[in-house]
């Protein structure tokens, strides 16, 4: 049969001893072709093993996962905001000038209330309180009439309630709002919302009387089926409330802690009543309610799809993704959607379906074919200093072990720090102690993505300073994607709250968004210095791997108040 290699056959006939003959042009050309092909194959293999083949073959995604590489790509993101309040943050809404007008009127109403600063009992009436009191006593809660008669009913709605800093520090209005504002229920893609201005509630709020009828029914009558770590449970919203602990919120007295369930319910009702009254004073119901409906559709209902889209299309080739403040509904949608085909998605076992703010670890299935080996969160919590009340809640910490395709073992952790960042150092200390104190973890490499909630200019004794945080992780032989010493002005948040949200101490005038906003270096990826070298780090507040400095966000196109933080790490082992 004819030879499949006719060129080589001809060469053999003309040169039977396989001697190199540079004077033979046919031989020289053929040899050059063979050598070029061989060199190309070798060089391409080299590029692929070092990660350079991505550019050689036209691939530009820096997160591209490849088990043949010595590097790992990772992203961390607190995805919480935009929460469920379309009015929470200042946004650009040029399409409708009524937005700016209403928000400015609310700002003026609160900053300069004048004759609008009426008493609480003129907005949340005595009849409303009596009805609420009967509901609360029927469920066995302590009486709070003395708080009402001696204090709250006579307060001015703005200067003595909405702007009361101590009330804010005690979380008596913001805590019940956080828990009952928006509740994800089993069997529905649409959440159930408390009747209030500051969520996606679509019912009629044109009068306080209409509001109260629906509010009372929501809190005490209608049962809602929610998902918990122990299975589906049906509860009424008042049953979801949690006591406000003095250990976490020192402004709360011991008696107020004991009475915190009915006390926060009363304050939450007063707060919502004031909001409804205020909106119907500065605008007409047929103006602000349609505006809210449009904003809800654009900002809130599209939040989860938009977040999933960014994770899938922009960061979908990451080896590791850690997320914070993740709802159970989001976890389900990610798990059963396209992301779930590429990633193992691990939620903490103590996931809190009521507070519904959980830390999540996502592992690329190609890089980590075995997925999660074990969750070690309980061991981390057990490593807290004895007798010290570290301010963490269920779902804040998620620490797991895993093994990559090369057999290397890891501890991957995700953490959401408390508002003041006071838990960040104790949690990192506990993770290090857990790894170093357990022989079965001693050969694991730690990669820790977190919203540290640290501050460039921390209030001493109340907030965690970013440089002190850097000194702490450095003392463990750790470094971060930002290096040993974090740059205090390397911000990953820039958001400015309006006056239509429950923490007015964080509200910013329309002219003071930069000066009084939350502009801080909050997000980190931490690891041992001896384990990894940083190849590249970037932050992203556009969903396009770019960060626009001095831009308040979230925006209509970027759905969180935290930027995405991403890094490429070269392994040293």
Image: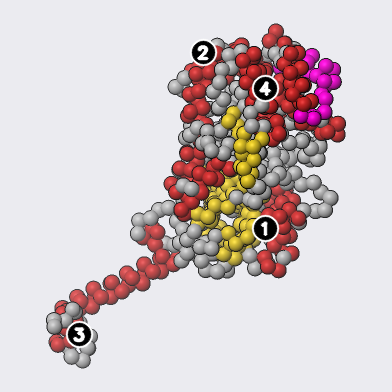
**Where is the N terminus found, in terms of image quarters?**
bottom left
Residue identified by numbered label 3? 21
- The numbered mark, 3 or 2, whose residue comes first in the sequence reads 3
| Label 1, residues with CA under 10 Å away: few <14, some 14-19, many ≥20 | many
Of the two numbered discs 1 and 4 in the rendering, the one whose residue sits closer to the viewer: 4
Q: Nearer the viewer, residue 477 or 452?
A: 452
| Label 3, residues with CA under 10 Å away: few <14, some 14-19, many ≥20 | few
In the rendered view, tell whether residue 294 sits above or below residue 466: above
Residue 461 x, y percent position in the rendering: 79, 40
| Label 2, residues with CA under 10 Å away: few <14, some 14-19, many ≥20 | few
Name the residue rendered at 56%, 17% in the picture. 204
- Image: magenta residue range: 139-159
Q: Nearer the viewer, residue 379 or 242?
A: 242
- The numbered mark, 1 or 4, whose residue comes first in the sequence reads 4
| Label 4, residues with CA under 10 Å away: few <14, some 14-19, many ≥20 | some
Residue identified by numbered label 2? 286
Name the residue rendered at 67%, 32% in the picture. 236
Residue 548 x, y percent position in the rendering: 50, 38
Name the residue rendered at 59%, 41% in the picture. 327
User: For the residues marked 4 and 2, what is the alpha-carbon distance in whole angstroms?
Assistant: 24 Å
**Where is the C terminus found, in terms of image quarters?**
bottom right
Does residue 503 appear in the picture of this structure? no
Q: Which mark is residue 216?
A: 4
Does residue 304 appear in the picture of this structure? yes
Q: Secondary structure at mark 3?
A: loop
Residue identified by numbered label 1? 376
In the rendered view, tell whether residue 4 sits above or below residue 553: below
């Amino acid at each position: 049969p004819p030879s499949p290699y006719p060129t080589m056959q001809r060469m053999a006939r003309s040169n039977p001893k396989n001697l190199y003959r540079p004077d033979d042009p046919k031989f020289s050309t053929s040899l050059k072709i063979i050598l070029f092909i061989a060199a190309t194959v070798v060089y391409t293999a080299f590029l692929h093993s070092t990660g350079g083949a991505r550019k050689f073959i036209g691939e530009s995604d820096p997160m591209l996962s490849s088990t043949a590489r010595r590097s790992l790509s990772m992203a961390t993101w607190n995805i919480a905001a935009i929460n469920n309040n379309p009015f929470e943050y200042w946004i650009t809404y040029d399409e409708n000038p009524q937005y700016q007008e209403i928000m400015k009127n609310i700002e003026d109403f609160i900053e300069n209330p004048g004759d609008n600063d009426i008493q609480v009992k003129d907005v949340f009436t005595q009849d409303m309180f009596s009805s609420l009191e009967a509901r609360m006593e029927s469920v066995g809660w302590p009486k709070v009439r003395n708080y009402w008669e001696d204090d709250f009913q006579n307060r001015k709605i703005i200067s003595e309630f909405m702007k009361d800093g101590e009330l804010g520090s005690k979380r008596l209005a913001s805590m019940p709002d956080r828990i009952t504002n928006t509740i994800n229920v089993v069997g529905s893609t649409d959440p159930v919302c408390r009747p209030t201005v500051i969520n996606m509630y679509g019912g009629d709020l044109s009068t306080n009387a209409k509001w109260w009828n629906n509010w009372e029914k929501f809190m005490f009558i209608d049962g809602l089926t929610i998902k918990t770590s122990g299975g589906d449970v049906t509860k009424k919203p008042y049953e979801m409330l949690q006591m406000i602990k003095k250990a976490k919120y020192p402004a709360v007295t011991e008696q107020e802690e004991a009475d915190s369930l009915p006390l926060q319910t009363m304050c939450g009702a007063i707060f919502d009543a004031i909001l409804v009254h205020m909106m119907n004073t500065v605008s007409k119901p047929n103006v602000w309610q349609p505006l809210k409906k449009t904003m809800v559709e654009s900002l809130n209902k599209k939040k989860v799809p938009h977040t999933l889209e960014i994770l899938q299309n922009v960061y979908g080739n990451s080896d590791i993704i850690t997320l914070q403040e993740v709802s159970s509904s989001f976890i389900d949608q990610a798990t059963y959607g396209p992301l779930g085909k590429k990633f193992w998605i691990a939620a903490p076992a103590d996931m809190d379906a009521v507070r519904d703010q959980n830390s999540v670890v996502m592992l690329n299935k190609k890089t980590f074919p075995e997925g999660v080996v074990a969750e070690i969160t309980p061991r981390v919590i057990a490593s807290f200093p004895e007798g010290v009340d570290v301010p963490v809640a269920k779902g804040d910490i998620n620490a797991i072990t895993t093994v990559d395709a090369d057999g290397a073992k890891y501890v991957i952790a995700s953490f959401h720090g408390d508002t003041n960042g006071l838990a960040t150092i104790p949690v990192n200390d506990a993770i290090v102690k857990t790894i170093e104190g357990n022989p079965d973890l001693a050969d694991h490499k730690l990669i820790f993505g977190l919203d540290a909630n640290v501050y460039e200019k921390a209030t001493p004794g109340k907030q965690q300073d970013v440089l002190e945080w850097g000194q702490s992780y450095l003392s463990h032989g750790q470094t971060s994607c930002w290096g040993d010493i974090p740059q205090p002005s390397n911000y990953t948040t820039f958001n400015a709250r309006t006056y239509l949200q429950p923490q007015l101490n964080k509200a910013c005038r329309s002219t003071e968004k930069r000066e009084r906003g939350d502009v801080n270096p909050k997000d980190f990826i931490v690891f041992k210095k001896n384990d990894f070298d940083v190849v590249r780090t970037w932050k992203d507040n556009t969903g396009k791997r770019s960060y626009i400095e001095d831009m308040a966000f979230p925006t209509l196109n970027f759905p969180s108040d935290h930027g995405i933080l991403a890094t490429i790490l070269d392994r040293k082992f």
